[in-house]
Image (tube, helix red, strand yellow):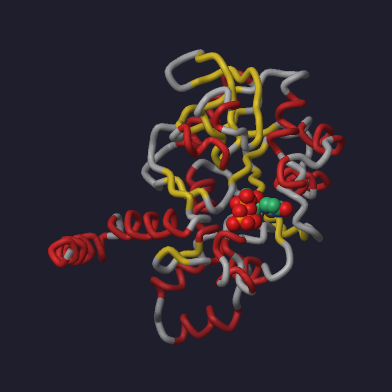
């Protein structure tokens, strides 16, 4: 069983400036839920209920969001707003711990900050700005692969060749249509040097031995401590598998990806599905 998830949320969110100057990117709402809540709910669907959130400067709102709010609950109770009360309480069976990454030194460094709180256990890592459509079963499929191979598993998605320089990219051999035994990983390669167009996306099942490797890596691409570099070193010691995800994912850390996520996830909400669809159709007639 995987019970624990690490959610790194200490990045600067430069692609989303100016709003991220003083507000966490992870709290940007898709309709009425902040981005990070989608990742928390994704985990809870598969029995993960211990969360370690890595935060940094200007990220206090994330802590408040998952904390108990006495005044708000009392007010909602008095007003008989029980549906809203249930909604704000829906994570009350999960536990949340917050660790501050004092400087945004990279994703690898952010994960290393959680070392004192992770025992000898496998755990999930979710990057909150990668929104996986709630109807997809990516995380549960990855957990099954971990259970089969007892090896780290990383989520992959095919990206257009022109985009490889935005991602960590792998080289590997297909074990099945969707399972890939990884041979190498490289962070943000140039298009002409890229070993494939299989990009690492923001879902990982990792094992405790990643911490020893993270402690020994040097700053890599962009001067940051990269998780991809640590995985590359770990590969010298043990197998790592990739899971080729073919479902819907939105890069909500990017402005256009965020707009796509907002429209698509709103269309799934029963209260908006029909009126939003009609509205979008009416817009197309005006172009
Ligand atoms: P990104 O590469 O998306 O960086 O980080 P970012 O700062 O969030 O956004 P941009 O690219 O500047 O617009 C991937 C994930 O790693 C976390 C981020 O919060 C995000 O979830 N991260 C990154 C950290 O927690 N600490 C870091 O030092 C860097």
Q: Quadrant of the N terminus?
A: top right
- Horizontally, residue 86 falls left or right of residue 12, namely left
| Residue for point 32% across, 60% down | 266
Q: Residue 266 versus residue 200: which sits nearer the camera?
A: 200
Q: Position of residue 29 (x, y in %)?
A: 47, 66
For the question of whether residue 52 can be seen, the reply is: no
| Residue for point 39% across, 60% down | 259
Vertical arrangement, residue 76 with respect to residue 272, above or below: below
* Quadrant of the rendered image containing residue 91: bottom right
| Residue for point 79% across, 59% down | 103
For the question of whether residue 91 can be seen, the reply is: yes
Q: Position of residue 286 (x, y in %)?
A: 15, 67
Vertical arrangement, residue 275 with respect to residue 258, above or below: below
- Horizontally, residue 16 falls left or right of residue 208, namely left
Q: Position of residue 256 (x, y in %)?
A: 42, 57
Q: Residue 208 versus residue 162: which sits nearer the camera?
A: 162
- Horizontally, residue 179 falls left or right of residue 227, namely left
């Amino acid at each position: 069983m995987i019970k624990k998830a690490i959610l790194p949320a200490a990045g600067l969110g430069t692609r989303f400036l100016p709003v991220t100057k003083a507000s966490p990117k992870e709290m940007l709402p898709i309709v009425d839920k902040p981005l990070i809540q989608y990742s928390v709910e994704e985990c809870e669907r598969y029995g993960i209920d211990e969360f370690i959130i890595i935060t940094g400067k200007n990220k206090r709102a994330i802590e408040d969001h998952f904390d108990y709010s006495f005044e708000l609950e009392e007010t909602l109770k008095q007003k008989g707003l029980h549906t809203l009360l249930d909604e704000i309480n829906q994570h009350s069976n999960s536990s949340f711990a917050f660790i501050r990454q004092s400087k945004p030194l990279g994703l690898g460094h952010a994960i290393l900050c959680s070392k004192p709180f992770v025992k000898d256990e496998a755990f999930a890592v979710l990057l909150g700005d990668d929104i996986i459509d709630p109807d997809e079963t990516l995380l549960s499929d990855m957990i099954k692969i971990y259970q089969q191979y007892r090896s780290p598993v990383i989520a992959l998605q095919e990206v257009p060749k022109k985009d490889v320089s935005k991602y960590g990219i792998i080289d590997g051999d297909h074990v099945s249509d969707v399972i890939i035994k990884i041979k190498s990983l490289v962070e943000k390669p140039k298009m002409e040097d890229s070993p494939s167009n299989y990009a690492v996306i923001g879902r990982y099942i990792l094992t405790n031995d990643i911490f020893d490797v993270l402690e020994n890596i040097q700053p890599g691409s962009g001067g940051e401590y990269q998780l991809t570099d640590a995985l590359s070193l770990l590969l010298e010691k043990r197998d790592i598998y990739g899971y080729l995800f073919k479902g819907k994912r939105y890069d909500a850390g990017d402005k256009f990806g965020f707009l796509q996520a907002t429209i698509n996830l709103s269309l799934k909400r029963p209260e908006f599905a029909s009126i939003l669809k009609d509205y979008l159709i009416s817009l197309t007639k005006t172009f």
